Image (cartoon, rainbow, N blue to C red):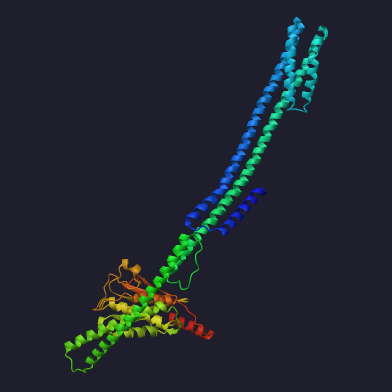
Amino acid sequence: MATPFTHLHRLLAMTTAVTRRWRPRSLLQLVLLAFLMVMLPLAVLMFQAGQALSELSRLADISARQAVEETRRARNLGALALEMERGARQYAVVEEASLLEIYAERVREFRQLLAQHALMLPDDPDVQALREQVDELARLPELPMEAFRQRLDDFLPFARHIEAMRQATGARIDARIDEIRVRAEVVQTRLWWQTAALVSASLLLMLLFTRLIIRPVRQLERRILGIGSGAQTGPTPAIQGPAELVSLDERLDWLASRLSELEEQKQQFLRHMSHELKTPLASVREGSSLLADGVAGELTPRQREILDLIDVSGGELQQLIEQLLDYNLLQHQQRFTPERLDIATIVKEVLAKHRLALLQKEMAVSCFDGPLVWQADRTAISRVLDNLISNAVAYGEDGGELEVRAHPRHDRLVVEVANSGEPIPPEDRPRLFEPFYQGRVRRKGALKGSGIGLSVAADCARLQHGRLELVDDPRLAVCFRLTLPRQVAVSDTPDEKRASAIEGADARS
């Protein structure tokens, strides 16, 4: 039983040595090598099984031939003994000399067959007795007739010994069959162990080559995911594997560098465009402000109406430029600084920025009461609230409602900004937070939106390990929910943490 495991150990050692010394240069070579190495133990198993079956077949054939020959010889010995007795008794009756010649011929044939049979049963007592008796019976023709007739009774023990010899022959044949059966069981057991060992070796080789093939593929998969998500920042280790996969890794390096260049060009374009747009816009807004102050003379009501439109459109354009700057900044800055803030105060500050727009749309605003202290990044949460309220002003209905709700929990803060108006179509919801995506619902006003406000808000939420999502509200058409986990600043002392918990409990009550 130790032999199959020894073969398995040698096979694994040989495979490891071959793998270390020679690596396939192509995926086709690796697959062909894997096929050959996996089939090798199975081929050895088939060869050994064929050898064992050939051996058993040969033993069975020899045993069958010997059994037939020995059985026929034993039967012939019995027939010759019967003819000898019949010839002797006939001679005792008719006293014809030709019968003695036939008798002597049968004795000679019997001796020859008995000598052959004695090779199979060398130590059998009945065979020895038959040899002695056939010598005595061969001397019968030399005796006088009276003595000849008296010795005819010697054929009775002679027949008994022949019958005993036939039984011994049958027992010998049965013993040989039992030996073949035992040998077959041993061979079968050996084949089972060899099958288990060699099939296990094939499975191990399959796992080994599967790992050799799958490992570089998974490395490429992680590389592609890293390139797609933008998480890959430093150099990656080179892939060790077939030439096709190594070449693909090199092409991914080229693709990653090319994407980095394009991303840098995009960021540079956004920075330059935002700067170039802010400079003339500042001049336009300054000029409209001077006209509104009457520097160029008194304005008619119609002129003041046009000037107000210019000023409002300039403000909206400035807001779009600031959103582009925020988007560009979030692509590079992935850190935030949590501090203790009163969320209610920040919401009121953001609402104050949009007071004129809310009055112009005659929207009814309701906000939760403070104070509500939470650990958050001031700039990030202000951007989220500013974009959500700006979105509500741009897409909400005139004379509608705007609600800002807050629900502090033990481990998170939930802030909801909901407004009445046209609901967002279901086909727009999956891509709602993608940059520069604009849905089917059009913005109300002269200036078209950029489609990055919600993307900036979602990025600011993720920056604080939170999330921004669109939820269903039973009363208002559009409801955005901002969820922020509880953050603990490094500088917080136990007393400050306890005070924060008390303030949060007061807000919930």
Pinpoint residue 234: horizontal percent, then vertical percent.
47, 73
> Residue 419 is drawn in which quadrant?
bottom left
Vertically, is 184 above or below 216? above
Instruction: Report the residue at 58% width, 55% height from top.
Output: 15
- Viewer-proximal residue among 85 and 232: 232
Determine whether, in the image, residue 207 is placed left or right of residue 367.
right
Pinpoint residue 461: horizontal percent, then vertical percent.
41, 76
> Residue 180 is drawn in which quadrant?
top right
Pinpoint residue 152: horizontal percent, then vertical percent.
79, 12
- How many marks are shown on the rendered structure? 0
Position of the C terminus, as image quadrant, is bottom left
Pinpoint residue 257: horizontal percent, then vertical percent.
42, 71
- Viewer-proximal residue among 251 and 73: 251
- Viewer-proximal residue among 507 and 150: 150
Q: Is residue 509 visible?
A: no
- Viewer-proximal residue among 286 and 226: 226
Instruction: Report the residue at 48% width, 83% height from top.
Output: 500
Determine whether, in the image, residue 100 is placed left or right of residue 352.
right
Instruction: Report the residue at 49% width, 85% height from top.
Output: 499
Determine whether, in the image, residue 363 is placed left or right of residue 146.
left
Q: Is residue 233 visible?
A: yes
> Residue 12 is drawn in which quadrant?
bottom right
Vertically, is 401 above or below 201? below
